[in-house]
Image: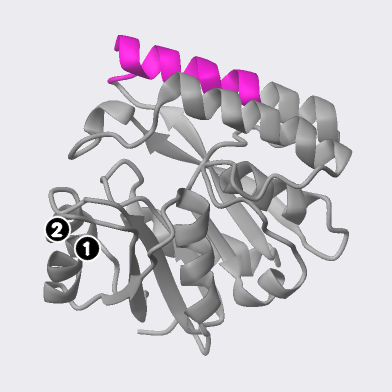
Amino acid sequence: MMVGKLSVSLVIPAHNEEEGLPAVLKAVPAQVDRVFVVDNCSTDSTAHVAESYGATVIKQPIKGYGSAYKAGFAVVETDIVCTADADGTYPVNRIPQLIDDLLSSNLDFISARRIPDDHSGTLNNIMRFTGNWILTAFTMMLFWKKIMDSQSGMWVFRRDILDKIKLTSDGMPLSEELKIEAWCNKNIKCAERNIPFSYSSRVGKAKLNLWRDGFRNLVFLFAKRLGIPMTKA
């Protein structure tokens, strides 16, 4: 079901997410016309599960969060693109609200700002949100843009902004790169909107390595600021 005259797609990167996908796909709101699950080198039944719920599966043999998203973005043709993780940590039921906000506020790009829910006191949440705060602080310092959650992986945006930005990272840094590209482009109107979030609600095995990926994201920020290519990051 379209939003007005605008078509909507949801892109979900997935590497061995057979456990988390069912709950996410069941919760996809009616406003989403097409769901694309990017099967990123899965060795389980991720693709089968996605297809059983009516999603279109895109095979991406190059492993990486960024490469998965770039493969998904390359095929979507809808007016509006939404994203979420396959592990259930992002509330896909908030998509209609974010789309309404995008349109009513005449925005081009909305990034969800994660607000810790009632499980936020766990050690896992504290460590990850602390890492996020550090990376976000460096993002604001290096690029002088008010981005309060540089690592969020839930976005709602107009498809045509993809023609105005350049995404290079094949890894986790794509999340921060996308926001930097959008916020630094004077022709793209951006904003953040709060959503509830908890790492504790994740289904399946976590793919993020806190220290390794955090360090890579930090290095990527400096490389991006200095104009040094880091495609494999």
What's under tag 1, amino acid-wise?
Answer: Leu
Q: From mark 1 to mark 2, how far is it between C-alphas?
A: 5 Å
Question: In the rendered image, is residue 121 in sight?
Answer: no
Query: In the rendered image, which quarter contains the C terminus?
Result: top right
Q: Is residue 131 inside the magenta stretch?
A: yes
Residues 107 and 166: in front is 166
Q: Residues within 10 Å of mark 2 (few under 14, many from 20)?
A: some
Q: Residue furthest bottom?
A: 5
Identity of the residue drawn at 38% across and 33% down: 208
Q: Which residue is mark 2?
A: 22
Check disc 2 and report its element: helix, strand or loop: helix
* In the image, residue 97 above or below residue 233: below
Query: Which residue is located at x 70 percent, y 37 percent?
Result: 147
To which residue does mark 1 refer?
25
What residue lies at 59% left-to-right and 47% top-to-bottom? 232
Q: Secondary structure at mark 1?
A: helix
Q: Residues within 10 Å of mark 1 (few under 14, many from 20)?
A: many
Residue 95 location, x and y as percent? 41, 60
Q: Point out residue 149 in the picture as x, y percentages from the top left corner.
A: 59, 34
Nearer to us in this view, 149 or 61: 61
- What is the magenta range? 119-135
Numbered tag placed on residue 59 in the rendering = none
Magenta stretch secondary structure, dominant:
helix
Asked whether disc 1 touches disc 2, contact meaning CB atoms under 8 Å apart, the reply is yes
The spot of residue 96 in percent (x, y) is: 42, 64
